[in-house]
Amino acid sequence: MAVTFKISGLDGNYKSGAAKENIAGLEYADASWDPSHWSGLTGDKYDARITGDGTYTVWMETGGATADGAIVFCIDINNLANDLVDASKVKAEIVNIALDTDPVFSMDYSKTEFGNKDGNGIDGRIEIYNEYGNTKKKGVDASNLHFAGNMIVNFTIKGIDGNLKAGASKNYKTELSYADADWNPSYWGGSSFGRTTVKGDGTYSVFATLPGECQGAVVWAIELYNLWKDLVDPTKVKVTINSVETPGKIH
């Protein structure tokens, strides 16, 4: 179940020094209390990162169990009232509740590339689609991407182990970069929400909240900060995109 909601009254209403970043999560139990979902409001893939007025999606899975009715059904937003000057100004509206959704976005990821971010000689970049990069030249098409809320990308990377220079950190902060076809909404990192650390060959997930309706892409990549400069031979690194989840998928 994916619940999309619109919230307003936040912009210009934060206290001085407030983080302006709050985690929203879905709280749900069916009429018999099972199945249920209780957000820890810690920022897992089911939550949303609230950064001001906008449209967001929170979601849950039941593990295949059937849910009937509800005894609890709400969205909590961690610390929001404490961060606002006047909480009474906040208005919220449920835009859509999607049930039995398939949250996986399908695309041909075989042309995904690993390279150097913007030629800076420092950072690695997994390019899924870039209007100005090689993926578009290879015929990648991300135009069918249409969602609101979270984008969750699971990937496998190989060729790091045994390929690092002496003194390499072996810990590389990793996060999404994404802009839809007209550059808005977009996300360029900077939050701990959805970020991971790549420590070598393995499978990882990164995710981000986009506060609005996203259609297509102009830039869609995974950044691996400081990895490029630590590699002996970057050509040995290979990446596979395993899945892309967009729970707030718009049909």
Image (cartoon, grey):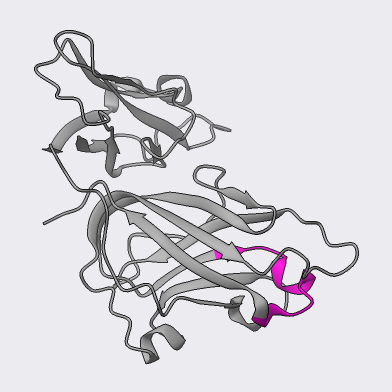
The x, y position of residue 223, in whole percent, is 57, 64
The x, y position of residue 89, in whole percent, is 28, 26
227 in the magenta segment: yes
**Across the whole image, how many numbered discs are drawn on residues?**
0
Q: Give the residue displayed 77% in from the left and 56% down from the top.
A: 170
Say whether residue 103 is left or right of residue 134.
left
175 in the magenta segment: no
Q: Give the residue displayed 20% in from the left and 48% down from the top.
A: 102
Q: Is residue 10 visible?
A: yes
Q: Nearer the viewer, residue 157 or 172?
A: 157
Residue 242's image quarter? Answer: bottom left
Q: Give the residue displayed 33% in from the left and 60% down from the top.
A: 185
Vertical side of 25 occupied by 243: above or below: below
Say whether residue 102 is left or right of residue 142.
left
The x, y position of residue 119, in whole percent, is 64, 83
Q: Start and end of the magenta stretch?
A: 223-235
